[in-house]
Amino acid sequence: MLTTAAMPEAALLDKARSFDRETLGEIYDRYRPGVYRYALRLLGEEGLAEECVADTFYRFLKSLQLGGGPQDHLQAYLYRIAHNWITDQYRRQPPPPLPLMEELKDDQDDPAQAAQERIRQTEVRHALIRLTPDQRQVVILKFLEGWDNEAIAQMLERPVSAIKALQHRALGSLRRMLLRQEQESDELI
């Protein structure tokens, strides 16, 4: 017999519909970290990210209770709920600067290089904020969360070709913005 940790999404969803506590706990444990990272990257605030996660799982349980919910692609369904919550949040107030993860931080002792890296992270953060919400979401899911185009397409309920086009436009925009920032900083020197 499969444990819930080894269970595929379809089996988890079947057991979740009967409100099996162990299964619901497994769904939360499996998907909460990713939904939280996604919300934190887009919202920039831990408290709001936690609120988004709580509401995402509340809405998921509520939809199950009402006989709805996903038939498959549970992860995409949860991220879609989080995306909608974040979109509503953006409508209420503009997004704060996006934090970039410090996991890639180099442990070198060169303060000049560390300062330059910090400046570059700030430039990338500001460029990401200036992308359209859909472009920003595709870039974050693809390059920070490691999703493939098919999963992003399922989450955004768009064809894969639209995701590829969004990604292409986003990377082009980021490239132009970062080059412009680099030229402006060179002119100041």
Image (cartoon, grey):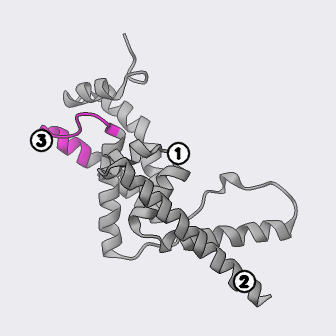
Where does the image place residue 10, in percent across and percent down from the top left?
29, 27
Q: Quadrant of the C terminus?
A: bottom right
Above or below, comparing residue 113 to residue 80 in the picture: below
Q: Which residue is mark 2?
A: 185
Where does the image place residue 61, in percent across and percent down from the top left?
23, 41
Question: Which quadrant of the figure has residue 26?
Answer: top left
| Picture residue at 69% right of the left edge, 53% below the top | 104
Q: Residues within 10 Å of mark 1 (few under 14, many from 20)?
A: few
Marks 3 and 2: which is nearer the front? 2
> Residue type at mark 1?
Gly
Question: Which quadrant of the figure has residue 117?
Answer: bottom right
Q: Which mark is residue 66?
A: 3
Q: Nearer the viewer, residue 158 or 31?
A: 158
Q: Is residue 126 left or right of residue 156?
A: right
Q: Nearer the viewer, residue 31 or 126?
A: 126
- Pick whichever of labels 3 and 2 is earlier in the sequence: 3
The secondary element bearing badge 3 is classed as: loop
Q: Is residue 11 left or right of residue 177?
A: left
- Callout 1 touching callout 3 (CB < 8 Å): no
Residue segment shown in magenta:
59-74
- Callout 3 touching callout 2 (CB < 8 Å): no
Q: Residues within 10 Å of mark 2 (few under 14, many from 20)?
A: few
| Residue lying farthest to the right in this orientation | 110
